[in-house]
Image (cartoon, coloured by chain):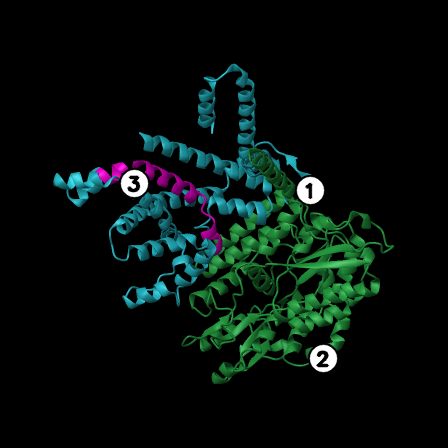
Amino acid sequence: MQSVSSQQVQAQTGSKKSKLSSIGLQKRRESVTGISFVLPAVILLIIFLLLPFMLAVAFGFTKFNLLRPDQIKFIGFDNYVLLFQDKLFYKSLYNTLYFTIIVVPVQSAVALMLALLVNNRLKMRNVFRIAYFSPVITSMTVIAILWISLYNPNEGLINSALHALGIPKQPFLRSADQAMNSIIFMSVWQAAGYQMMIFLAGLQSIPKDLYEASAMDGANRLQQLKYITIPSLYNVIVFVLTITTIQAVKLFTQPYVMTNGGPENSTRTLALLIYQQGFQFRNAGYASAVSVIFFLLVVIISFSMKKFLKD
Amino acid sequence: MKKNITTVTGLIAISLLAGCSTGGQTNSAPASGDNNQSGQKEIEITYWRPQASGPEDEFYVRRVDEFNKAHQGQIKLTMEPITRGNSFAYEDKINAAVASHTLPDVVSMDGPNVANYAASNIVIPLDEYFTKEDMNDFVPSIVQQGTYQNKFYAAGLAESSVVLFYNKKIMKQYGIEPPTKMEDAWTWDQWYDVMKKTSKDDVFGTNMINDKGEWMTYAFEQMWISAGTDIVNKEGTEAQGWVNSDKGVEAAKFLQKMANDKLFNIDPKPTEFEEGKAATKLGGPWNIPGFKNYPDLEWGITYFPKSPGGNLTAPSGSWAIGVSADSKHPKEAAEVVKWMTNKDSSAQLAKAISMPASRKSAYDSLPEYNELPMRIIKEQVITVSHARPVTPAYPVLTQKFAEALTDIMMGAEVKKSLDNVASSFDDEFKRNFSK
């Protein structure tokens, strides 16, 4: 927008001085238009992002029962003291980080492989593309309910398949050892298609002549992948890793629908803890304190990833 | 062109702002109607209740229609069914509405939440709107459930009870005679033997998981009571030494034993019993209407099993209805509460959902409660039932207790899980409710 207007201004500066005032008017008119374009977004950002966040920070210092909004009491850092003594907080933090650390590399790798696959000139490639992408556009709640029955220890499809292969039936969501990994598996399956699409776009923007030239030099497919595809995709990879991390840290729907944080809190995540404390136990003050910590965690992770990946 | 764009974006921005500033539907009642009985303008009353199905829904729709006809020109009642979800979705909605002051005038609430809502001043006392005769007509557990610190806050729409349904054919097959007299009620051990005998080829000994939320507390707290303890003390202030007492641990261990022996399905199909895939079922009268859809099913009712050497007991409590503190028309809202819980409503709802009625007078038109199998429900309601704990920290109690029981059924260590419930509840109570 700015560059356009400056061009116009430059083009017009060569003309007569009498036009100067009308240029000023036009410039002002354009900035009004610009502001009015940006204004709705800015207002929405303030109302739905900035304001709630500032409120969360403020409420973090209060004792605030959701059912008694008129009895808010300032209690300083008590919520934070409580939080750092809360075993469930550490457990949730651990679960959140565990999920993130496994999901981000696995899901990105799976997505890249899928993208390489559907980028080939396969006959059925459109079918594959649709197949891999379709879980992404289905609601997570629906998928979670579907997977509850897939994971069912008695008559679930996965266990039936395992049984047919001679592998003993697994408890999956019913076992504290397996529940989180089961959620990880289905989450990767569900979301990899999204990253696949981004990788695919990246792959298709790599110039074909690079591959042709390298083929003439005698490079094989693996060398092409290593020296052409991956380096060309670098920015896409950084983008994918960053958004996947941010999404992973926010894990909520799967454990909420499938396990309610159990068994034995093995799938309780920070987002679930915030929801339970804030809305079910009505401790809005405490939940706000956890949200602030959660926010800091996301900021730290995103910035350190940015720095790490740029180096 | 540019001018147009400016205008359009400006309008969008303004309409967005306006959209944000108008609250919920509750504010739509005309303010001019305040304390004005002259009938110039109808007073709008809004009412939330959890979503139901079939005859229950039809009952609500019909009674609301009849109310509107009877009060034409004075009060207009708008009812909004809210999804109940698998466990606590309705409560979440209420909590959010309290925070944003968008509660309707009249709210339905589950029995054990009455104390919490009353303690938080979300609902107002209704004593001035109910006569002595009215109060005497409610069955005792309804008055107990609706009363917090000597004030009556919510009237029960119906009562409830949990019984043990059994499949007559399966019982006959194994030569089992379920008890029909209170003194013969099965103990846990006898029930266990029945389950063990009937648990064969695709058939579970019992079906007892309705959901993993409120049901867990509603049904299984009774095992603590039957064993001679409870999950919190009488005052509702302490769980340590109650939920995790020796007797409590015994009760939980029994549940775990049933799970380990695979006598019930922890993720059952809702119609497992109806399809003949479970020999018995812990369930309530609300299940009965659905049995009609399974003509092959021959069912009977016996008592909620008791602890060996312990007391007979059964859950009680059901949805109640009260007036929210946000209501600008408490008098008219109380009219709605009275209407929805009067003799006619009570009898009609009891019939529609086969729940025991909340008013004694309603039983006059419910003769089926005088003979088997329904007699057992009435006996339990009138003589041995226990309501859930009356404590303002109930949300934490029920969540943590339900989570612990689910974990225990999946194999978690019993004592540790129950200790965790006790400390969570006690911490919460000390932090937020002790004076």
Q: Which residue is mark 3?
A: A205
Assign a secondary structure to mark 3: loop
Q: Chain of mark 3?
A: A
A222 or A244, nearer to the observer: A222
The residue sitting at 70% across, 52% down in the picture is: B104
Element carrying mark 2:
helix
For mark 2, what is the residue?
B367
Displayed quadrant of residue A123 = bottom left
Q: Are marks 2 and 1 on the same chain?
A: yes
Q: Is residue A248 in the magenta section?
A: yes
Specify the amino acid type for callout 3.
Ser
Quarter in which the C terminus of chain B is drawn: top right
Kind of residue at disc 2: Pro
Magenta stretch: includes residue B388 = no
Q: In the rendered image, which residue does mark 1 sit on?
A: B435
Q: B288 or A209, which lies in front?
A: A209
Mark in the foreground, 1 or 3: 3
Query: Vertically, is B219 above or below B423?
Result: below
- How far apart marks 3 and 2 lie (CA) works out to 79 Å
In this rendered view, identify the residue nearer to me: A214 or B216. Answer: A214
Amino acid found under the numbered disc labelled 1: Lys
Name which quarter of the figure residue B430 lies in.
top right
Q: Main secondary structure of the magenta part?
A: helix
Q: CA distance from mark 2 to mark 1?
A: 48 Å
Instruction: Find the magenta span and give its range.
Output: A228-257
Judge the density around disc 2: few (<14), some (14-19), many (≥20) Cα neighbours within 10 Å: few
